[in-house]
Image (spheres, rainbow, N blue to C red):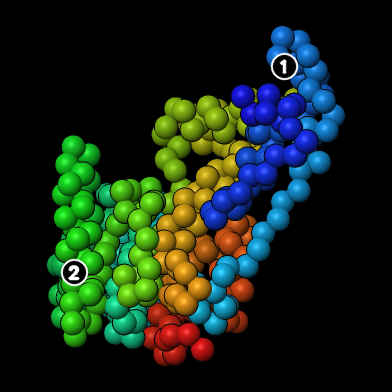
């Protein structure tokens, strides 16, 4: 176990490219020692207290000028971009996201990888974009490929990725658009370096479903683990204490950070990171983004899609 490793070592280093936010990870790996018994009744040494852990974060290997990060709070017509579960059936919002993506594709060369919170929202948005003629406008600029939810046919996803790659790398190509899902087969372990990922677009905020009994139990346990407060029924009562909320947001943002990290893969690489949801401007959410994203915002802050379309693209 991790506790046994810590007992035998003078120091333990956990390193990774997408570990932020990490506070909950440290706390769960190094639980507070008050009254805790482990390993046949032996008390955990005081040196394993979470307060003794040190968190370090360094900038990306690329210069900040190679990263353009922006939160798009509203689309070209001024419609707010916000995709909570209750708002994911709002046709006007869905089509506004498509119009914003179309505007971005007019100025971003190469490949554009778009991540959605779920296969359901990906399907709903792409259907509305097709019905509204938005997808056809995008396809006139860049062919569109979409990840499918076919668990038993992983080779089909490989074919989609191969087709997308071939289109982007075709001589004289204007690039392509790849629609995928956070936590899906294309969000982890695949590098969209250079022209394969000149932009990563996050549509919505991928909070995990509270309908999962496992997640609800985990949140309730985390909330009550250092508190004498009544155990909260997250799924049944829809309530969440401050500690559970922190864990819930951290799980979401680690998935976001893994997805946006697919684009910048070497020192000479460059890409735009675009967040199509006004909630990314919230201090609690923005504070859980990697430091290299914050430093790469270039003072742009957040604004409408029309202002994004006027941004100069490429490394300084």
Front residue (pair 10, 133): 10
For disc 1, the neighbor class at 10 Å (few under 14, some 14 to 19, many from 20) is few
Decide which of tag 1 and tag 2 comes sooner along the chain.
1
Q: Which numbered tag is attached to residue 38?
A: 1
- The number of callouts visible is 2
Residue at numbered disc 2: 166
> In this rendering, is residue 305 above or below 50?
below
Rendered location of residue 221, percent (x, y): 61, 27
Front residue (pair 194, 250): 194
> In this rendering, is residue 258 above or below 312?
above
Left or right side of 213 for 28 = right
**Residue 106 occupies quadrant:** bottom left
User: Which residue is at the far right?
Assistant: 46
Q: Residue at x 78, y 32 (%)?
A: 48
Front residue (pair 225, 42): 42
Q: Residue at x 78, y 14 (%)?
A: 42
Rendered location of residue 137, percent (x, y): 18, 79
For disc 2, the neighbor class at 10 Å (few under 14, some 14 to 19, many from 20) is some
User: Which residue is at the far top?
Assistant: 40
Report if residue 209 is visible in the image.
yes
Q: Residue at x 50, y 73 (%)?
A: 267
Looking at the rendered image, the disc whose residue lies closer to the viewer, 1 or 2, is: 2
**Gap between marks 1 and 2 measured at Cα:** 54 Å
**Residue 228 occupies quadrant:** top right
Quarter of the rendering occupied by the N terminus: top right
Q: Residue at x 29, y 57 (%)?
A: 180
Left or right side of 206 for 147 = left
């Amino acid at each position: 176990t991790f506790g046994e490793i810590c007992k035998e070592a003078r120091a333990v280093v956990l390193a990774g490219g997408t570990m932020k936010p990490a506070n909950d990870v440290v706390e769960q790996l190094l639980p507070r020692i008050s009254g805790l018994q482990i390993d046949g009744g032996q008390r955990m040494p005081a040196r394993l207290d979470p307060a003794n852990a040190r968190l370090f974060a360094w900038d990306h290997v690329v210069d900040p000028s190679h990263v353009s990060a922006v939160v798009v709070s509203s689309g070209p017509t001024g419609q707010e971009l916000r995709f909570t579960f209750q708002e994911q059936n709002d046709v006007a919002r869905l089509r506004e996201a498509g119009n914003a993506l179309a505007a971005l594709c007019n100025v971003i060369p190469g490949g554009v990888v778009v991540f959605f919170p779920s296969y359901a929202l990906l399907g709903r948005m792409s259907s509305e974009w097709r019905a509204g003629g938005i997808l056809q406008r995008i396809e006139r600029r860049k062919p569109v490929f979409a990840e499918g939810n076919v668990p038993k046919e992983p080779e089909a996803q490989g074919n989609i990725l191969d087709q997308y790659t071939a289109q982007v790398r075709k001589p004289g190509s204007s690039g392509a658009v790849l629609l995928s899902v956070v936590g899906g087969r294309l969000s982890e372990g695949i590098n969209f370096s250079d022209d394969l990922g000149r932009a990563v677009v996050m549509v919505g905020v991928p909070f995990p479903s509270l309908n999962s009994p496992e997640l609800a139990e985990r949140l309730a346990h985390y909330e009550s683990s250092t508190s004498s407060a009544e155990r909260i029924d997250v799924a049944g009562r829809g309530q969440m204490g401050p500690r559970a909320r922190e864990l819930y947001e951290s799980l979401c943002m680690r998935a976001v950070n893994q997805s946006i990290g697919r684009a910048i893969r070497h020192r000479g690489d460059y890409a735009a990171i675009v967040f199509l949801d006004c909630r990314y401007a919230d201090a609690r959410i923005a504070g859980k983004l990697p430091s290299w994203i914050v430093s790469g915002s270039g003072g742009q802050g957040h604004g409408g899609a029309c202002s994004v379309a006027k941004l100069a693209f490429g490394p300084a």
